[in-house]
């Protein structure tokens, strides 16, 4: 091993990898030379890399520039390992979202981003049988799980924040991620797993390990990924989780085989539905982790962003939202119907999703074969196409980009069609759009609203004077700051 990793071998390996990446960048650029680039450099062979530097330094500004320069067509931006073809208008978005999966594929697009065929496991990539279960059973079960979630949220808020008489500094992201991970796992695998703190921490960490592993694996050729995957933090993390809940999964499999299974949770529906090769303990552990990846950080970031938004303008939003919750839930108890009747709260969440969507690129699809738009523009096989959030969410114009939390409830009161936080459209893509729009959004909205409503019933909240919630970029992702503390005081 020492000989294999000698400085000479490492240097030779690095030169080979560098040459491979330069040649690949040159070949890639040739295929997309018909599409205008935004913020690429001038040095031949390195143009797309300079473009990647510009895009990754400020994705939002790069996309705004592209959308302004090419409002009717497509343009391309570069990341370190690929080029992304971006559309700026709703017609083009609708056109590519209607393409069949055999032509423009969502699984391949996600795989490009998080390499999940290798970081999670081939089963999740080739057999996504969990998606219809999330869209169907999990969504239908939202009403049934509200009371258990409510009890859990109450206990966790007592533990994390308590009932402070005076203003208390609270690292709110740490609180929301723990609550989301626990109530999410309550629905995924039941209380035994949700109350296993070591597993919850490991499931939260798994997503981060996966992101790092994806960066390590992405530049490698496919044959190398097959081996390198076993050396990644994601693989170690998955095995660690297997050690923690493997016995519990095996018990649930045995109960089901004995006809004694009673649970109404995702694990049960997975066991009942899995194809034979997926109906094993390691594969079910992998599938639960895949769902944790889809569910924990997305929901936490969206909720944290909503809390920061509220704390920046508490005078404007806290009291009206609290009054609405008190009016519809006078005893402080929630049901699905009561949550659905909170129209101001829903409007607030939709506007947070419009202004502060987690991604700057939406609904990415990767071409399995060449795709041709009506205007003749071709997305070549192997390339990504996405929507530009800044233009589709109308963030180019300063007036339209202004946060207006009660805009949608006001429009509905004026007799216009109600636009809900979970209704996707060509110009609202916080949950994507089309056949592959997020199937977990109804569940996520219920979780977020319950936590948010509990918070505003219990606490006054505001930012610490002199501080401001900043957004950070990780690639094309736009995420809320995680370290910011806010001030909270019991009502
Ligand atoms: C606020 C929280 C969430 C946000 C912002 C979010 C966002 C998204 C987005 C943008 C997509 C891609 C849609 C597209 O390409 O058009 C997606 C897909 C997906 N999400 Fe979510 N998500 C959230 C919560 C959840 C939860 C709680 C679950 C599961 C319990 C989940 C499961 C999935 C799955 C399985 C897909 C893949 C769908 C497919 O490929 O057909 N998500 N999500």
Image (cartoon, grey):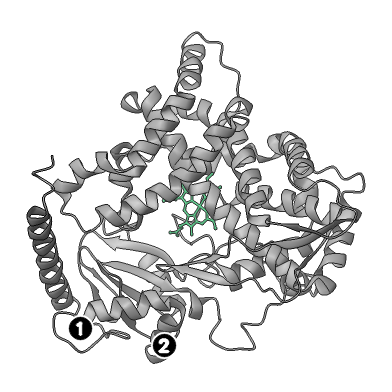
Q: CA distance from mark 2 to mark 1?
A: 18 Å
Mark in front: 2 vs 1: 2
The mark found on residue 34 in the picture is: 1
Q: Are marks 2 and 1 in contact (CB under 8 Å)?
A: no
Q: Position of residue 317 (x, y in %)?
A: 81, 70
Question: Which residue occupies 55% across, 67% down?
Answer: 357
Q: Quadrant of the N terminus?
A: top left
Question: Which residue occupies 21% across, 44% down?
Answer: 228
Q: Would you call the spot at circle 2 few (<14 residues within 10 Å), some (14-19), or many (20 or more)?
A: some
> From where the camera sits, is residue 107 visible?
no
What element does badge 1 sit on?
Answer: loop
In the displayed structure image, the side of residue 165 where residue 384 appears, left or right: left
In the displayed structure image, the side of residue 416 where residue 50 appears, left or right: left
Q: Position of residue 82 (x, y in %)?
A: 25, 68
> From where the camera sits, is residue 248 visible?
yes
Does the numbered disc 2 mark a residue whose Cβ is under 8 Å from ligand 1?
no
Q: Position of residue 10 (x, y in %)?
A: 12, 55
| Quarter of the view holding residue 264 | top right
What element does badge 2 sit on?
Answer: helix
In the displayed structure image, the side of residue 197 where residue 85 appears, left or right: left
| Quarter of the view holding residue 118 | top left
- Say which label, 2 or 1, has the lower sequence index: 1
Q: Quadrant of the C terminus?
A: bottom right
| Quarter of the view holding residue 347 | bottom right
Q: Would you call the spot at circle 1 few (<14 residues within 10 Å), some (14-19), or many (20 or more)?
A: few
The mark found on residue 65 in the picture is: 2
Q: Position of residue 289 (x, y in %)?
A: 45, 38
Question: Which residue occupies 73% across, 63% down?
Answer: 486
Question: Which residue occupies 48% across, 74% down?
Answer: 389
């Amino acid at each position: 091993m020492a000989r294999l990793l000698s400085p000479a071998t490492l240097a030779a390996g690095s030169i080979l990898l560098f040459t491979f990446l330069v040649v690949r960048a040159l070949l890639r650029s040739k295929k997309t030379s018909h599409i205008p680039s935004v913020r690429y450099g001038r040095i031949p062979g390195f143009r797309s890399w300079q473009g990647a530097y510009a895009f990754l330094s400020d994705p939002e500004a790069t996309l705004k520039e592209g959308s302004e320069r090419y409002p009717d067509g497509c343009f391309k931006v570069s990341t370190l390992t690929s080029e992304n073809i971006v559309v700026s208008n709703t017609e083009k978005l609708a056109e590519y979202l209607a393409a069949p999966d055999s032509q423009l594929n969502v699984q391949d697009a996600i795989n490009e981003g998080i390499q999940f065929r290798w970081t999670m496991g081939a089963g999740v990539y080739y057999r996504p049988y969990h998606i219809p279960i999330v869209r169907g059973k999990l969504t239908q079960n939202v009403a049934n799980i509200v009371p258990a979630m409510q009890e859990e949220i109450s206990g966790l808020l007592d533990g994390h924040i308590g009932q402070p008489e005076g203003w208390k500094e609270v690292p709110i992201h740490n609180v929301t991620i723990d609550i989301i991970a626990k109530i999410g796992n309550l629905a995924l695998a039941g209380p035994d797993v949700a109350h296993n703190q070591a597993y919850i921490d490991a499931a939260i960490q798994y997503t981060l390990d996966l992101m790092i592993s994806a960066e390590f694996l992405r530049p490698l050729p496919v044959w190398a990924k097959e081996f390198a995957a076993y050396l990644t933090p994601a693989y170690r993390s998955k095995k660690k989780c297997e050690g923690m809940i493997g016995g519990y999964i095996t018990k649930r499999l045995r109960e089901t085989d004995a006809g004694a299974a009673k649970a109404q949770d995702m694990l049960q529906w997975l066991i009942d539905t899995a194809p034979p090769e997926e109906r094993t303990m390691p594969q079910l552990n992998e599938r639960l982790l895949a769902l944790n990846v889809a569910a924990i950080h997305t929901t936490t970031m969206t909720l944290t962003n909503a809390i920061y938004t509220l704390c920046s303008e508490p005078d404007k939003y806290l009291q009206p939202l609290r009054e609405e919750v008190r009016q519809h839930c006078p005893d402080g108890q929630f049901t699905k119907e009561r949550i659905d009747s909170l129209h101001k709260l829903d409007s607030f969440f939709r506007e947070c999703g419009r202004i502060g969507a987690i991604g700057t690129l939406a609904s990415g699809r990767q071409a399995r074969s060449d795709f041709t738009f009506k205007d003749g523009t071709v997305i070549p096989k192997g390339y990504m196409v996405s929507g530009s959030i800044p233009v589709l969410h109308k963030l180019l114009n300063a007036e339209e980009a202004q946060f207006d939390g009660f805009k949608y409830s006001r429009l509905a009161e004026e007799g216009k069609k109600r636009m809900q936080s979970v209704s996707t459209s060509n110009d609202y893509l916080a949950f994507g759009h089309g056949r592959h729009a997020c199937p977990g959004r109804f569940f996520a909205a219920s979780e977020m609203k319950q936590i948010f409503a509990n918070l505003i019933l219990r606490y006054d909240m505001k930012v610490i004077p002199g501080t401001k919630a900043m957004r950070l970029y990780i690639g094309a992702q736009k995420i809320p700051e995680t370290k910011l503390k806010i001030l909270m005081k019991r009502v």
